[in-house]
Image (cartoon, rainbow, N blue to C red):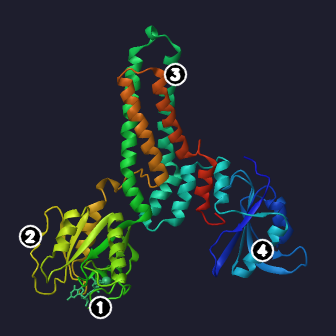
Amino acid sequence: MFSEDTIAAIATPVGIGAIGIVRISGVRALEIADQIFRPFSGVSLKRSPSHRIYYGYIESPFDRQRIDEVLTTVMLAPKTFTKEDVVEINCHGGPVSLRQTLELILQLGARLAEPGEFTKRAFLNGRIDLIQAEAVLDVIKAKTDRASLTALKQLEGGLSKTIETLRDATLAATALVEAFIDFPEEDIDFSLLNQLMDDAQNIKTQLVSLIESSQSGRILREGLKTAIVGRPNVGKSSLLNALLGSDRAIVTDIPGTTTDVIEESINIQGFPIVFLDTAGIRQASNQIEEAGIYRTMKVMSEADLTLLVLDNGAQLTKIEQDLMAQGQNMIAVLNKCDLPITLDANQIPQSISKVRISATKGFGLDQLKSVILNQIIHSEIEGAELIVSNVRHTDALKRALNHLEHFILSLSQNLPAELIALDLREILDAFGEIIGATTAEDILDRIFSEFCIGK
Ligand SMILES: Nc1nc2c(ncn2[C@@H]2O[C@H](COP(=O)(O)OP(=O)(O)OP(=O)(O)O)[C@@H](O)[C@H]2O)c(=O)[nH]1
Ligand SMILES: [Mg+2]
């Protein structure tokens, strides 16, 4: 792609920092920068070597007003992020000099970049594929070291390579099947059919393992949604506060203190865990409470994991037993273990893990954290090379798998080649969509609009 216009944006966050960067990309990047940059060396950027940093001033070409003392980096195409000419101006990190510098650049004919437009150009100019473009966003948004590492691996192209290989294998199979369409039945070589079946099974194995990795991938990306539920006053908010190590939620000895959902994240061994403290469940005594309990049930139904907090100093109630009966992915947290024990733990179903804690005294919390991790995170995530962490990718992979299974079935039933070729084309489309070879414009727009301006 060759883009006519030159784009510019402030690439660093709003606010005050040691430095702030204005980035320009496009054919006019150097010409525009030369009009506002007064280099100490006196040599214009156009005549200076690429991939170097130059010291000087930003000055308005209109009234000679000096705006900032800066370091300017020149990067000539094609060895740049966008594969276009790029100039980056490192200003002092105050909002005024950054804004004034950007305004001058825009007055001189650059256009303000849209969110993600630099990355979009990198993609459209073939420097990175769509998986890598999305990984750029994931690196930026990663909540923990581990999530960042997974995104970096995708940026390096690991997943891209795997999808490319699968796509090539499907392409080879398509060529074979299409040859069958052109040849009369008697000429068909049956060993080729067997070969086709083997190849399809191979692709399937890889697809299944990629799809399996996506559960852990989603957790790395978005965090494990963990609902904290239970009767009023059992210590749900105390537990949230203990896990966070701060007094985030209001705790009182009045039942019904929490009326809305409180969401906070912590990092357990590199996994972001999002805790949702909820209103206690009981027969509601007013509308606010009723609405709160309704939300609790909703949060629980959408969560990856539920911590059912129980009061160790009380008998199990009917509500709690009902919750345990329907609870999937549930951990029973027996709280207030610093007080005398009344609760009969044998009444808790075997299938539910039990952890004894005291939220206020702080014991049992480490054990709870490790039970949380064990419950959800499959061991294969440790050191796993490839993790699919993007819902868009997972959906396309699932679509490919459906068609592949249909293909395998059709092949085993000796259905006409024309028919089975259709499935292969759908699989090719799905792979193409993931890497961006056949992705519709509106999907691209949606992906890049999630970025911030300047990236
Ligand atoms: N002894 C003891 N008291 C606790 C413990 N955890 C919580 N409490 C007390 O139990 C009372 C209720 O605690 P909360 O954390 O507000 O309970 P909750 O489940 O959030 O209650 P609601 O928001 O009303 O549903 C407070 O007085 C806490 O100090 C514990 O481990 N041991
Ligand atoms: Mg509470």
Give me the C-alpha separation between circle 4 and circle 1: 53 Å
**Tag 1: residue type?**
Thr
> Which label belongs to residue 454?
none
Name the residue at 39% across, 26% down: 410
**Which image quarter: residue 403?**
top left
Spot occupied by residue 312 in the image (x, y as percentages of width and height): 15, 80
Residues at circles 1 and 3 in contact by the CB criterion of under 8 Å? no
**Circle 2: element type:** helix
What residue is pinned by disc 1?
Answer: 252
In depth, the one of 113 and 68 nearer the eye is 113
- Ligand 1 within 8 angstroms of badge 2 C-beta: no
> Which label belongs to residue 178?
3
- Nearer to us of marks 2 and 4 is 2
In depth, the one of 311 and 299 nearer the eye is 299
Spot occupied by residue 358 in the image (x, y as percentages of width and height): 21, 83
- Looking at marks 1 and 3 on the same chain, the residue that comes earlier in the sequence is marked by 3
**Tag 3: residue type?**
Glu
Spot occupied by residue 406 in the image (x, y as percentages of width and height): 39, 32
**Circle 4: element type:** helix
Residues at circles 2 and 1 in contact by the CB criterion of under 8 Å? no
Give me the C-alpha separation between circle 2 and circle 3: 63 Å
- Ligand 1 within 8 angstroms of badge 1 C-beta: yes
Name the residue at 66% across, 49% down: 124
**Residue 399 seen from this side:** yes
At label 2, counting other C-alpha atoms closer than 10 Å, the crowd grade (few under 14, some 14-19, many 20 or more) is few
Give me the C-alpha separation between circle 3 and circle 4: 58 Å
Give me the C-alpha separation between circle 2 and circle 1: 29 Å
- Looking at marks 4 and 1 on the same chain, the residue that comes earlier in the sequence is marked by 4
